[in-house]
Image (cartoon, rainbow, N blue to C red):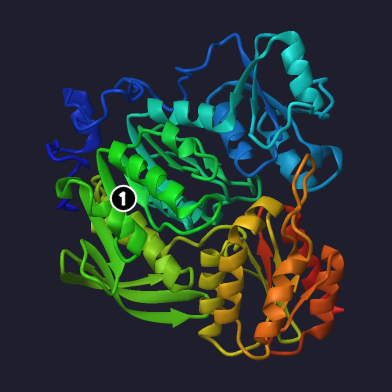
């Protein structure tokens, strides 16, 4: 079994630090897949542009998206010429985000094709961008190269010497932020690609800190299974926190996650999650570091002590009590996230006296159980929960303390709603308590062609016969107004959903309304 004392995550590890290994010419990834992309050389720094041709510029279609914005910031931070467009920019939504991009030297254009003028440009677009979007039409007309977001990200990731890929249905962004903070506190100066704003790195001048551009040899990134692009990444350390239904069937997820950890030199896996434990059981024990809550593992958390906006636990390493850890983020799920981050740090030569204080100082992500404020005894919380597991974790954390829950859940798309229908209904029936209220507006719709086979009304129709106080209010603002009007002192209002940056603005408006 992989020991936390090892300085590199493979069976034949160099006993010195990563930097010393590189200087002496020791291979940092001896167990690496022979078909993987070549590693960066020992002399490369984070601001080198090995994959990028200097005469090319990079244009992001949908540059304000949660997965696109940090990637654009990383490229710009490494010296590339970056520009982009976004329909939210055209609609005047979230102007502060686009101001932040411009402050980093990223030029913005209307999404009308005017920003694409040359075959020397590389056009980056997600799979959600349809070919009929004017920017895509113009890119074809001028002969510009097209790459998907995961194609570009995976190439940057795979070029780095030390690569930590964070996978799992839930907790990816939080674990990525935790690892990034530990590495930063340890002086490792990593590059971090995250799908959420990391509060520890946010400043008044850089409020949208979903990316970090470092000069060290480590690239830390969450990797997405929803579109199958997880297959593009070749990590030295693969982190797997959990496997549950979200965008794909469990059969597909088992294959994708199993292949991902199998390509890594070492894996950090939550054996408290049955699906993840099954994947771990098929791997070479010498390459796996395990973690779990209340179960024997390389890293174990016991004696959890919840607090309203934090949690404490006893950390055991290799079966021995190490110390009590006090997190600044709440919930059992964040204990699992912290164990994953600590294990990845230990496997990367960061010792417990450095890693543990860092994890205790991690203050969380925007929109992850974020307390917006309190008015007249009513607390408003903004949360990213959008699949059954994430929502259940938030509800369990809240129900550990008194107070009624008034929940607005905006599904993050018609497709995901169809996939998760049965599990969502089961979760809400089992997790909501007497007195709680649930309101579902219509799912997020950002344009394009979409099949509306399952709607929010369908979910409500299955919940009400089970005794759940649920209602479908199609308009999101009307749904929010209903919760504000229903709230009483002691209640907690929770806004949940993904793929919609304006939910945070809505939560703030609800707090303002409660203050009136």
Q: Which picture quadrant has residue 335?
A: bottom left
Are there few (<14), some (14-19), or many (20+) residues within 10 Å of tag 1? many
How far from the left and from the top, in percent, is residue 33?
27, 29
Q: Is residue 402 left or right of residue 228?
A: right
Of residue 182 and residue 6, the one placed in the foreground of this image is 6
Q: Which picture quadrant has residue 406?
A: bottom right
At x 33%, y 23%, the residue is: 39
**The C terminus lies in quadrant:** bottom right
Q: Give the SS element for disc 1.
A: helix
How far from the left and from the top, in percent, is residue 278?
29, 57
* Residue 514 in sight here: no
Q: Is residue 260 left or right of residue 309?
A: left
Q: Which residue is mark 1?
A: 344
Q: Is residue 211 left or right of residue 293?
A: right
Vertical comparison of 136 with 207: above or below: above
At x 45%, y 47%, the residue is: 252
Total labels: the figure holds 1
At x 81%, y 29%, the residue is: 111
Of residue 204 and residue 28, the one placed in the foreground of this image is 28
* Residue 86 in sight here: yes
Q: Is residue 23 left or right of residue 443?
A: left
How far from the left and from the top, in percent, is residue 261?
32, 43
At x 86%, y 64%, the residue is: 475
How far from the left and from the top, in percent, is residue 371?
63, 70
């Amino acid at each position: 079994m992989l020991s936390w004392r090892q300085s590199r995550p493979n069976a034949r590890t160099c006993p010195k630090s990563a930097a010393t290994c590189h200087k002496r010419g020791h291979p940092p990834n001896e167990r690496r897949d022979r078909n993987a992309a070549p590693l960066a050389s020992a002399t490369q720094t984070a601001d080198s542009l090995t994959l990028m041709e200097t005469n090319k510029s990079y244009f992001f279609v949908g540059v304000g998206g949660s997965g696109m914005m940090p990637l654009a910031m990383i490229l710009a931070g490494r010296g590339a010429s970056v520009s982009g467009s976004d329909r939210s920019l055209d609609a005047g939504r979230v102007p502060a985000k686009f101001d932040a991009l411009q402050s980093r030297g990223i030029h913005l254009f209307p999404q009308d094709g005017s920003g694409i003028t040359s075959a020397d440009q590389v056009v980056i677009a997600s799979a959600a961008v349809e070919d009929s979007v004017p920017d895509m039409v113009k890119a074809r007309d001028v002969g510009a190269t097209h790459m998907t977001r995961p194609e570009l990200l995976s190439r940057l990731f795979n070029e780095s010497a030390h690569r930590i890929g964070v996978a799992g249905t839930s907790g990816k962004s939080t674990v990525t932020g935790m690892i990034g903070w530990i590495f930063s506190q340890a002086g490792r100066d990593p590059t971090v690609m995250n799908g959420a704003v990391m509060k520890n790195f946010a400043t008044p001048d850089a409020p949208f800190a979903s990316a970090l551009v470092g000069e060290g040899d480590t690239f830390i990134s969450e990797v997405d299974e929803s579109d199958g692009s997880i297959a593009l990444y070749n990590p030295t350390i693969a982190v797997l926190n959990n496997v549950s239904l979200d965008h794909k069937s469990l059969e597909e997820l088992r294959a994708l996650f199993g292949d991902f950890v199998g390509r890594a030199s070492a894996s950090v896996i939550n054996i408290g999650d049955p699906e993840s434990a099954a994947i771990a059981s098929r791997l070479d024990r010498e390459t796996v570091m395990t973690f779990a809550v209340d179960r024997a593992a390389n890293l174990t958390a016991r004696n959890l002590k919840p607090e309203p906006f934090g949690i404490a636990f006893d950390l055991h390493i290799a079966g021995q009590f190490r110390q009590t850890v006090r997190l600044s983020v709440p919930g059992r799920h964040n204990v699992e996230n912290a164990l994953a981050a600590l294990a990845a740090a230990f496997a990367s030569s960061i010792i417990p006296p450095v890693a543990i204080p860092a994890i205790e100082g991690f203050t969380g992500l925007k929109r992850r159980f974020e307390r917006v404020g309190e008015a007249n005894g009513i607390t408003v919380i903004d949360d990213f929960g959008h699949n059954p597991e994430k929502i259940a974790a938030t509800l369990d954390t809240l129900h550990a303390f008194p107070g009624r829950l008034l929940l607005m859940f905006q599904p993050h798309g018609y497709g995901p709603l169809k996939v998760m229908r049965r599990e969502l209904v089961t979760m809400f029936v089992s997790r909501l308590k007497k007195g709680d209220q649930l309101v579902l507006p219509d799912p997020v719709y950002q344009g394009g062609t979409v099949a509306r086979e399952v709607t929010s009304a369908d979910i409500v129709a299955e919940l009400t016969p089970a005794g759940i106080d649920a209602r479908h209010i199609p308009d999101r603002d009307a749904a929010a107004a209903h919760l504000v009007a229903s709230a009483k002192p002691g209640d907690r209002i929770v806004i949940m959903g993904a793929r919609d940056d304006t939910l945070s603005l809505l939560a703030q408006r609800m707090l303002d309304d409660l203050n009136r």
